[in-house]
Amino acid sequence: MSNEQLTQTIKAFGDAWNRHDIDALMAFMHKDCVFETVAGPDACGARHQGQEAVRKAFEAAWLTIPDAQWLNAKCWGHEDQGVLESTFTGTAADGSRIEANMVDLLVFRDGKIVLKNAFRKNRPHLPAKA
């Protein structure tokens, strides 16, 4: 896959997140995929391994924050690695708003994402809209 094709794949992956389209997201993921979350008990956040575990972790993002969006995407790729930079937005269960820059570091194998390692700024939630 050329660097341009890789970049377009990363953009399409980000678009699937904004559509909340789990089937499209999983079509981008390698059969041996790993997702490392922005938070969790380990140095890597929390690690989810395999298609089933990754699918559940991806779906949990929309269950926790139903209006989640990843805006202002900037994507690039080189060889077997890529970056998806965005601004994460959404509403927490208590009504407070989340708006923080984030980045996904992606590793590809056989044209699919084998590792999605997510990082997000640790910004306090904003007050609920009046």
Image (cartoon, helix red, strand yellow):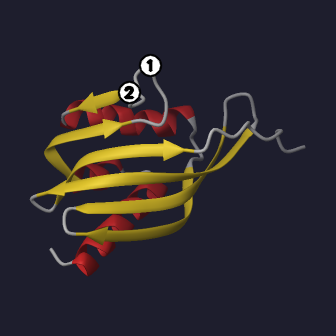
Q: How crowded is the residue under tag 1: few (<14 C-alpha within 10 Å), some, or many (20+)?
A: few
Rendered-image quadrant of the C terminus? top right
Disc 1 and disc 2 in contact, CB within 8 angstroms: yes
Residue at the (53%, 51%) spot, across then down: 102
User: Residue 8 location in percent, x, y?
Assistant: 32, 74
* Residue 79 shown left or right of residue 76 in the figure: left
Q: Residue at x 56, y 41 (%)?
A: 66
Q: Please give left or right for residue 69 compared with residue 2 in the image.
A: right
Q: Amino acid at mark 2?
A: Ala
Up-down: is 128 above or below 82?
A: above
Q: Amino acid at mark 1?
A: Pro
Q: Which mark is residue 89?
A: none
Mark 2 is surrounded, within 10 Å at the Cα level, by few (under 14), some (14 to 19) or many (20 or more) other residues, namely some
Considering only vertical position in the picture, is 56 above or below 18? above
Which residue appears farthest toward the top when viewing the image?
41
Residue at 60%, 44% (x, y): give it. 121
- Say which residue label 2 marks: 46
Count of numbered tags: 2
User: Extreme left residue here?
Assistant: 110
Q: CA distance from mark 1 to mark 2?
A: 6 Å
The x, y position of residue 41, in whole percent, is: 44, 19
Secondary structure, mark 1, is loop
Is tag 1's residue or tag 2's residue first in the polypeptide sequence? Answer: 1
Viewer-side residue, 43 vs 40: 43
Residue marked by disc 1:
41
Residue 87: percent from the left, percent from the top?
59, 57
